Amino acid sequence: MKNLLALSLLLPSLAYAATVKFSEELIPLQVNENKVEHSLFSSVDEVTVSQGQHKIKVKYKDLYEIDYDEHEVIESEPFWLVINIENSEATYQLSMPRADDIDGAKQYIKSPFVTFKEQGTNSQALRLEPVKAQVVLSKEQKNKTHLPVATASAPSNSAAPKSSSKIQVVAEESPNAPVSQQPSALSMLEFWWSQASEQEKAAFLANKKGS
């Protein structure tokens, strides 16, 4: 089981907190002012937050097979989302529609979006577009100005949706351009480790100890 970012790391005095889960292609990088730490053998796929509005920085990363023995990592620039938590005891899901092929994935990272939904309810999933890095305010500013919320609409099944949001996609570090690279041995190991079951991980570690 992947590691849960402990509530005490984010909100130590919080009595009730909602859980936000991420699909395996979405990597959480920061929640409000708190950076999310990942390791080779333990990656974070859910966080806990209080009721209210939160800024979450994520990036998309996936591995596609090009040929029988050739793979390519498709990775987006980091981007920010703004979510509203209405139920402090609920579990929410941030997901994206996985493209069927590498071309669809490359189109997706040009205009990424995610869906946001409270689990266990009949409410419709909201489509969230990235917000500009400039509107993700510093801790000193956030008490003076209300953050805009990413536009919400019905989710699309297409991995390359037409842009309809008034908020353009701008990555924090640099313009949001496609990033395509050949995977290193380390990134391949990280990817396949995240896909392995607990039994497979235990068998692998036992094999390494015996070798």
Image (cartoon, grey):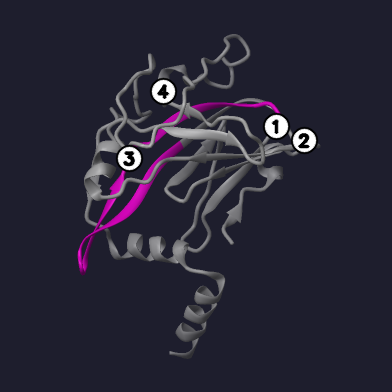
Distance in Å between CA atoms under marks 4 and 2: 27 Å
Q: Farthest residue toward the top?
A: 144
Mark 1 neighbour density, 10 Å: few (under 14) some (14–19) many (20 or more): many
Instruction: Determine whether label 3 and label 4 are within 8 Å by CB.
Output: no
**Regarding mark 3 in the picture, which secondary structure is present there?**
loop
N-terminal of the two: label 3 or label 4?
Answer: 3
Distance in Å between CA atoms under marks 1 and 3? 28 Å
Q: Tell me where the magenta segment starts and ends, as one range.
A: 58-87
Q: Reading the chain from its start, which is encountered first: label 1 or label 4? A: 1
Q: Nearer the viewer, mark 3 or mark 2?
A: 3
- Give the quarter of the image for residue 7: top right
Q: Position of residue 128 (x, y in %)?
A: 46, 27
Q: Earlier in the sequence, mark 1 or mark 3?
A: 1
User: What amino acid is at disc 3?
Assistant: Ser
What secondary structure is marked by label 1?
Answer: loop
The kind of residue on which mark 4 rests is Ala
Residue 147, image x and y in percent?
54, 15
Q: Left or right: where does residue 84 sit relative to residue 65?
A: right
**Between marks 1 and 4, how big is the CA–CA gap?**
22 Å
Q: Contact, CB < 8 Å: mark 3 with mark 2?
A: no
The residue where tag 4 is placed is 133
Residue occupying the point 34% across, 31% down: 173
Which comes before the other along the chain, label 4 or label 2?
Answer: 2
Tag 3 residue: 76
Mark 2 — residue? 14
Q: Quadrant of the N terminus?
A: bottom right
Residue carrying label 1: 50
Disc 1 residue type (three-letter): Ser
